[in-house]
């Protein structure tokens, strides 16, 4: 049951990106201002989102397997893939991403890490869109230490209230109500980072 709920949660962002790209294509066509660049960019976003939907199924099918195959990848490329997936939603909401990411290689589960970032950015977006008449910013910083990598993600949405901060990683805890959140995202993200990424 938790797996199905988390798949639904993971699919919300890519489906929103596909919907936004489709709307953009329709509007540009109706206004007769379609360019090859707009068309290619929208199709690329759709393709990446569809691949993510498919990959999510495979990832969760293998979630509890002990023989997971780790790969070696650049952390900045993982962020680039994540930014592509969220770009339509962030652009629509006028959310700016500012980065300071060192180019660092690490071993781990690439797609699961993307899922963690998707969860965090999705949560940030949900809070930032509530803020009217202010600049909406998400800051990403990656720092390499001797044996560790530190990743900082910060937004200017106001932070998590102190009275619930101790509950945010509990399964099914959500502030979004039954219709908008499963409460699984951060819970699963914590499992991925601690149990699967040695974080």
Image: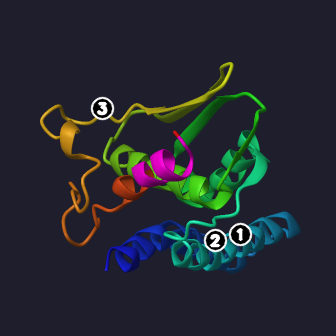
Verify whether residue 195 appears in magenta: yes
Residue linked to disc 3: 158
Crowd around label 3: few <14 · some 14–19 · many ≥20 (10 Å)? few
- Front residue of 50 and 171: 171
Residue at the image point whose x is 56% and y is 79% from the top: 57
Residue 50: x %, y % from top left? 66, 77
Whether residue 121 is visible to the viewer of this picture, yes or no, is: no
- SS assignment at label 3: loop
Residue 195: x %, y % from top left? 48, 50
Residue at the image point whose x is 56% and y is 70% from the top: 14
Say if mark 2 contacts mark 3, CB within 8 Å.
no
Camera-nearest label, 2 or 3: 2
Residue linked to disc 1: 48
How far apart are the two marked residues, 2 and 1, measured between alpha carbons?
6 Å
Say if mark 2 contacts mark 1, CB within 8 Å.
yes
- SS assignment at label 2: helix
Crowd around label 2: few <14 · some 14–19 · many ≥20 (10 Å)? many
Camera-nearest label, 2 or 1: 2
Residue linked to disc 2: 52
Verify whether residue 49 appears in magenta: no
Which of the 4 quarters of the picture holds residue 21? bottom right
- SS assignment at label 1: helix
Position of residue 122 in the picture relative to residue 31 (left or right): left
The mark nearer the N terminus, 2 or 3, is 2
The mark nearer the N terminus, 1 or 3, is 1
Specify the segment rendered in magenta: 190-198
Residue at the image point whose x is 70% and y is 49% from the top: 78
Residue at the image point whose x is 63% and y is 53% from the top: 82
């Amino acid at each position: 049951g938790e797996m199905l709920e988390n798949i639904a949660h993971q699919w919300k962002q890519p489906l929103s990106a596909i919907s936004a790209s489709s709307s953009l294509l329709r509007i540009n066509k109706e206004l007769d201002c379609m360019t090859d660049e707009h068309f290619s960019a929208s199709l690329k976003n759709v393709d990446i989102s569809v691949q993510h939907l498919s990959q999510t199924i495979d990832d969760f099918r293998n979630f509890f397997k002990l023989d997971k195959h780790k790969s070696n990848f650049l952390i900045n490329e993982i962020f680039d893939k994540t930014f592509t997936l969220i770009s339509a939603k962030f652009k629509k909401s006028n959310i700016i991403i500012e980065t300071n990411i060192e180019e660092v290689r690490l071993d781990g589960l690439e797609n699961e890490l993307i899922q963690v970032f998707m969860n965090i950015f999705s949560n940030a977006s949900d809070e930032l869109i509530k803020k009217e008449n202010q600049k909406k910013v998400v800051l990403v910083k990656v720092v390499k230490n001797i044996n560790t990598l530190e990743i900082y993600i910060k937004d200017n949405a106001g932070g998590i209230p102190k009275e619930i901060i101790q509950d945010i990683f509990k399964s099914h805890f959500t502030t979004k109500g039954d219709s908008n959140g499963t409460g699984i995202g951060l819970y699963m993200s914590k499992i991925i980072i601690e149990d699967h990424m040695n974080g």
